[in-house]
Image (cartoon, grey):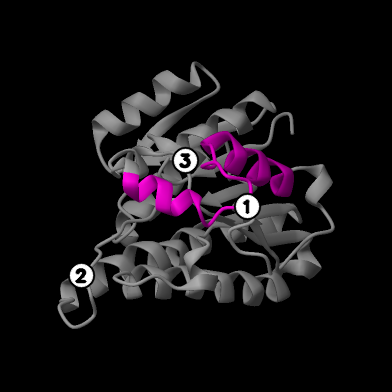
Amino acid sequence: MEDKIALVTGASRGIGAAIASHLAAQGCQVVGTATSADGAAKISEQLAGKGHGVVMQLQDSGSIADAVAEVNDRYGMPTILVNNAGITRDNLLLRMSAEEWGAVMNTNLTGTFLTTKAVIRGMVKARFGRIVNVGSVVASTGNAGQSNYVASKAGLEGFTRSLAHELASRNITVNCVAPGFVETDMTAALSEAQTAAMLDRVPLARMGRVDDIAAAVVYLAGEGGGYITGQTLHVNGGLFMA
């Protein structure tokens, strides 16, 4: 993957930071996005000369255009895109506000659409591209209190399959990686009882690690994943078996 240019959204921490680091270790020049200048600086520090961080707001098409233009001016157009950034606004549907619904859909799904649209022309011109969308196991299982998040991630899988059909003739693959329960800041806030209840449902009896997800993304973005497109790769310890 030497000299490939990769754009990873939501790369300041957790799964996104691990993906950016793994891609950099494979020789990619990596640009990671964050929603703040501090987050972008953190990405630059983590990449240690193998890329840098930029500020990008997924709900703002102008911000996305500016960030992609900055990448293009500095390195060239990315031929690897990892749509990782996402948010949650959990609530039962009876109590969920239109703002909670819209914020999640606009970031997780529309933001992915806008970011992908901003880079695919360069991939088509290069006749090469790897797009990996980070979904979630809940797109397949559902989850109470997350109808907005689940809908956005299920939509992401449909988006993946449709775009794979559109871009295959240009040697561009489009896939989705769906993590299960992963050790992140979010799961670290769970109580011992909540964590135990989650692990009871996982045949491998452990939480996933961010490196587990990053390894799957790197595989699909690399040469080994060149004949895989339109697929959802579940990385969940057996929590869901398709």
Position of 103 with respect to 180 (left or right) is left
Q: Is the residue 132 above or below the residue 230 in the image?
A: above
Name the amino acid type tagged 2.
Glu
Pointer 3: what residue? 16
Alpha-carbon span between mark 1 and mark 3: 25 Å
1 or 2: tag closer to the N-terminus: 2
The residue mark sitting in front, 1 or 2, is 1
Alpha-carbon span between mark 3 and mark 2: 23 Å
Q: Helix, strand or loop at disc 2?
A: helix
Position of 220 with respect to 105 (left or right) is right
1 or 3: tag closer to the N-terminus: 3
Pointer 2: what residue? 100
Q: Is the residue 45 above or below the residue 63 in the image?
A: above
| The magenta segment | 193-221
3 or 2: tag closer to the N-terminus: 3
Q: Which of 25 and 178 is in front in this view?
A: 178
Pointer 1: what residue? 203
